[in-house]
Image: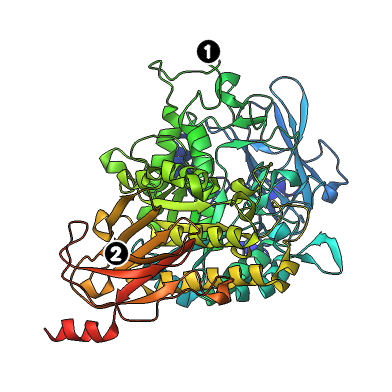
Amino acid sequence: MAKKTQGKPVNTTPVADRQAPVWIYSLLTDFDISLFISGKHFRLYEKMGAHPLEVGGDKGTYFAVWAPNAHDVYVTGNFNDWHKTSHRLYRRLDSSGIWEGFIPAVEKGTIYKYFIHGYDGHNYEKGDPFATRWEHPPQTASVVWDTAHKWKDQRWMKVREKLNALDQPMSVYEVHLGSWQRDPADHTRILTYKEVARSLVPYLKEMEFTHVELMPVMEYPYYPSWGYQITGYFAASSRHGTPQELMELIEELHANDIAVILDWVPSHFPGDAHGLFKFDGTHLYEHADMRKGFHPDWKSYIFNYDRNEVRSFLISNAVYWIDQFHADGLRVDAVASMLYYDFSRKEGEAGTNIYGGRENLGAIQFLQDLNEFVYSNYQGVHTIAEESSTYPGVTRAVEDGGLGFGMKWMMGWMNDTLQYFKTDPIDRKFKHHQLTFSTTYAFTERFMLPFSHDEVVHGKSSMIYKMPGDEWRKHANLRLLYAYMFTQPGTKLLFMGNEFAQNGEWNFTRSLEWDLLQFAPHKGMQRYVKALNHLYRAEPALYHFGFSHEGFEWLSADDADHSVYVYTRKGAAAEDTLIIILNMTPVYRENYRIGLPFEAEWEEIFNSDEEIYFGSGKLNKQTFKPEPVRYGERDFSIQLNIAPLAAMVLKQTTKQHKKRMAK
C-alpha cells in the first residue's frame, strides 16, 4: 500500500509538470542534507532509495540516489520496458550529489535499476544501494518494496533490556539459513523464512539457547560467499522470501524469548557490476587508492570511511536492521581488517593515514559513531566485534577512548583452546598453561567465546574430528571442551551442527547431518549441550560476573602432571558459588584432593561423564563434607573421584544453603 508523505517537501510539483515522466519532488529537507554530508545522518533509509507514496492524490514511487559525479541518472525497469533514458531523475541544486524524483504509476513490486552515465564516460546499470528488496539471484535488479509490518513482539521489546543485558546468560546458536535444513524432498531447495521458523524456533527453545545469530541475511549475489559479499545492504535476501517474512521469523523468535543477532559486513563489498563498485563512474563508496580500497584476500573492495556520506550510509544500514527488523544485536564482521591499512598486506603494500600510521582513522571514527548511536538510542541492543588484533579498548566506552562495542570475540582464547584439545592427552601436561593463559587478559575486554563456522570449513575439520583418540575419547574430549567453554567467563557462541558433533565439515550446499542423531554418541552430545545450556541459564555464577574478575578464581591452575584444572565461578551471593573440575586425561582419578573456597558441604550437580551423554557413568552421588585439611592455600578441602576426560561442577548442598542463610 502506498504511503502518504508527511511534512512539507523541499520541492513541490507544479500542475503543469504532471505530464512529465518524472516529477520534481523530494522527501529530503535541508537538515537531512546537512546531516548526510557531515556524516551524521543515521536514518537515510527513510528518505533514500525507492518509496511508494502519493503525491497530490497520484500513487507512484519516489526515487533518491547518491551519485555526485554522474552526468545523468535514469530509472529503468519493467514499468518502461527497460528504456534506458526515458525517466531521468533531477539533480539537487545543492552539494549533496543526490538525484531524485517521483515517477507516477510505479507500484510496489516494480523491478528497476539506475542507468547512470558515469563521470568516466561509461554507462552503468546499478541496483539501488537503498533497495529494500532485490530479485532472486542470479537476477540483479532491485524491487520497489517497503518495510511495512504490524509487529506483534511488543512484550519482547519491553523486556529486552533486562533479558539481553550484559549480566544475563547469552548462549548463541550461529545459523546459516541456507544449510541448517533443506527440503527433505529436494535437497537442492533452501527453505523460506517461514519454513525455517517452523523448525528452527522450537529447536532453539528445546535446546535452551538464549540467542540465535543469523549469518548475513542481506542480499548477496554469490552463494558460496555465505552472505559476506553483499550488494543489497538494505534488503533481506530474496532466496528465503520477502522482508516481511524475515520479520515474521524474528517475531516468532521473540515470542519464544530468543534474541536475534544479525551478522553485518561493513568492512568490504564485491565488485559486481550491479553493486556499489564505481557506482557513478568513480570510486564513490571505496577508496580510489587500492592500497586502501582493495582487500587482497577476499578480492573485494574496502569502504572509504574517510568519506562522510559513506559513514552515513553504513550507520544508517546498521540502524535500519535494528529499527525496521527489531534485531537485538549486530555482530560486526572483520573489524581488524577495518582498523588497519596493512591488514593481510605485505610490507610496503599498504597505505597510511595522514600521520603516516597504519591505523584507519576514518574506520575508527565510523565504529565509534556507530556504537555511540546504537547504545544511546536502543536499549537492550548490543554490537559484537569479530576482532582478531590487539587493538586496545574495543569494548571500552567511546568517551574513554575506546571503540564502544558491547562485546568482542575472544579469538586468542579460541585458538589456544583448540590447539590444546587437539593435543594427545599424554602430552597435555607440556601445554598445561596454554589454557590458563587466557585468564591473564580475560577481563581486559568484554569477551564472547566463539566456536564459529570459520572453525569447521576449509580443511580445518569438524569439531569432533579435531579431538584425539577413538570414538569414545573424541566425544568425551568434545564434551569436556564444551564444559570448559560454558564455565569460563564470557558469553558463548556455538555454530550449528557442533551441538550434535556433526562428522563432516560444514557444507553450505546441503543440510546438516541430522541423520546422525539416530546414533548414541551424537544424540548424547545433543542432550549434553542442552544440559549445558540449562546449567548456564540456571546458575547465576556462570553469567552474573561474566566480564569481571569478581566472578572467577583459580583453586588449582598448576597441576600439569595430572592435567587437572580446578576453579570457581561466583555470583552475587556466596551460595551461588560453583567449583569446576576438569580432567584432561582418560585416567580415572580416585581420591583427588581439592581445596575449597570456603567451609561448606558440596554436591555434584553436573558431570559430563553421564551415560545419557555417551559417558562412562562414573559419577559422585555422595555429599562432600569439608575436611580441616589445608590444601592449595585453602583451610578446608575434600577428596573426590574424577571421571576420565570429564568435567564436574559442584555446588553447596541445599541443606547447607539453608544453614548459611539461618546464620
Q: In which quadrant of the rendered image does the C terminus lie?
A: bottom left
Amino acid, disc 2 = Arg
- The answer to whether residue 336 is seen in the rendering is yes
Q: Position of residue 162 (x, y in %)?
A: 36, 70
Q: Position of residue 130 (x, y in %)?
A: 63, 47
The answer to whether 628 appears left or right of 515 in the picture is left
User: Which of the pair 45/497 is nearer the observer?
Assistant: 497
Mark 2 neighbour class, 10 Å CA radius: few under 14, some 14 to 19, many 20 or more: some
Q: CA distance from mark 1 to mark 2?
A: 57 Å
Which residue is at the front of the view, 339 or 472?
472
Q: Which residue shows up at 39% across the image and 69% down it?
A: 641
Closer to the camera, 411 or 487? 487
Residue 318, position as x, y percentages in the image: 51, 50
Indicate the amino acid at tag 1: Gly
Q: Please give the label number shown on residue 593.
A: 2
| Image position of 276 (left or right of 36) | right
Q: Which numbered disc, 1 or 2, marks the residue that appears first in the sequence?
A: 1
